[in-house]
Amino acid sequence: MAQNIYDQPKFLGLQPAGPLDRRPTPRNSGWSIDAAGRRTWPVDAYSAEGPRSTDWLAQGVIKQHRIIGTYLNLLGHAGFSIGHVQEWAPTDEQVAARPELAEERERPMLLLVAARR
């Protein structure tokens, strides 16, 4: 019988069909607006890993939050060598072409990791 590698402790953070969106999902998810009208994206309990419920694409979506270090360490323990890490944000040119992307510079939108085994 084939063994499911994802059941092994070093792979528990890498589940099949897991979420690709790695933005931190605060309990009070969404933009906050301060008294001056400045919009911020709150990040609370960032270091508390585990399931988080949010209304994203549908109500009651359960995401498995992990800190960046957990992902990088899991890749290393699985024998991967990390070649590059980038926290992507739109460039000035992209914002000029699509102004709605400006708010994506206020929060971590994507984490891109190049790894090779």
Image (cartoon, grey):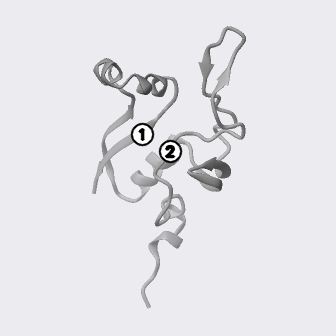
Q: Is residue 11 above or below residue 113?
A: below
The span from disc 1 to disc 2 (Cα, nearest Å) is 7 Å
Residue ID at (36%, 27%): 90
Is 1 in front, or is 19?
Answer: 19
Residue receiving disc 2: 22
60 over 29 or under it: above or below:
below
Residue at 57%, 47% (x, y): give it.
66
Q: Are marks 1 and 2 in contact (CB under 8 Å)?
A: yes
Q: Residue at x 31, y 25 (%)?
A: 94
Q: Position of residue 51 (x, y in %)?
A: 66, 54
Residue 99, relative to residue 108: is it above or below?
above
Which SS class for mark 2? loop
Depth order, front residue of 100/25? 100
Q: Considering the numbered disc 1 on the image, is that residue within a helix, a strand or a loop?
A: strand
Residue 11 point in image, percent of width and height? 49, 63
> Which amino acid type is shown beneath numbered disc 1?
Leu
Q: Give residue 111's mark.
A: 1
Q: Residue at x 42, y 27 (%)?
A: 101
Mark 1 or mark 2: whose residue is earlier in sequence? 2
Relative depth, front residue between 20 and 92 = 92
Whole-percent x and y of residue 49? 64, 48
What residue type is disc 2 on?
Arg
**CA neighbours of label 2 inside 10 A, class few (<14), some (14 to 19), many (20+):** some
